Image (spheres, rainbow, N blue to C red):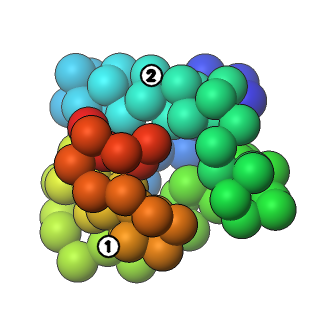
Amino acid sequence: MDRDRLGDALEEFDPTPGERRVVVRQALDLSDSGRFEADTGNALTREEIVRNLRDAPDKRLPERWNWWLGSLAMAYGGTNGSKYGP
């Protein structure tokens, strides 16, 4: 996954530079871990990330990201401290 292309795609959520940097870093970590692909059978792409973040009820990018990770934890197991936890 390309850091710059993901960061550009996240601009639709009007993040601050810090918000963008943190979410990009966490998304890259998730991609590198292979957890998402192992659980869902799909590659983690920037399109997949943006599509899911659009579904989140919260406005700010970090809250949207945390909401999605919580959804993944509920769907594929775990709670705080799990493979999808903070």
Closer to the chain start, of discs 2 and 1, is 2
Q: Nearer the viewer, residue 6 or 37?
A: 37
Tag 1: amino acid: Ala
Q: Residue at x 40, y 78 (%)?
A: 55
Determine which residue is flagged by label 2.
25
Q: Is residue 33 visible?
A: yes
Quarter of the image holding residue 79? bottom left
Q: Residue at x 75, y 51 (%)?
A: 38
Residue 84: give x, y in percent of width and height. 41, 47
Q: Residue at x 72, y 64 (%)?
A: 40
Specify the quadrant that holds the N terminus: top right
Q: Secondary structure at mark 1?
A: loop
Q: Is residue 61 visible?
A: no
Answer left or right for 1 relative to 56. Answer: right
Vertical comparison of 31 with 39: above or below: above
Specify the quadrant that holds the C terminus: top left
Q: Nearer the viewer, residue 64 or 4?
A: 64
Q: Residue at x 44, y 42 (%)?
A: 83
Q: Secondary structure at mark 2?
A: helix
Quarter of the image holding residue 48? bottom right
Q: Could you tell me how far apart the alpha carbons at marks 2 and 1 are, in whole angstroms?
A: 19 Å
Determine which residue is flagged by label 1.
56
Q: What label sits on residue 9 in the rendered view? A: none
Q: Residues within 10 Å of mark 1 (few under 14, many from 20)?
A: some
Tag 2: amino acid: Arg
Residue 54: give x, y in percent of width and height. 42, 71
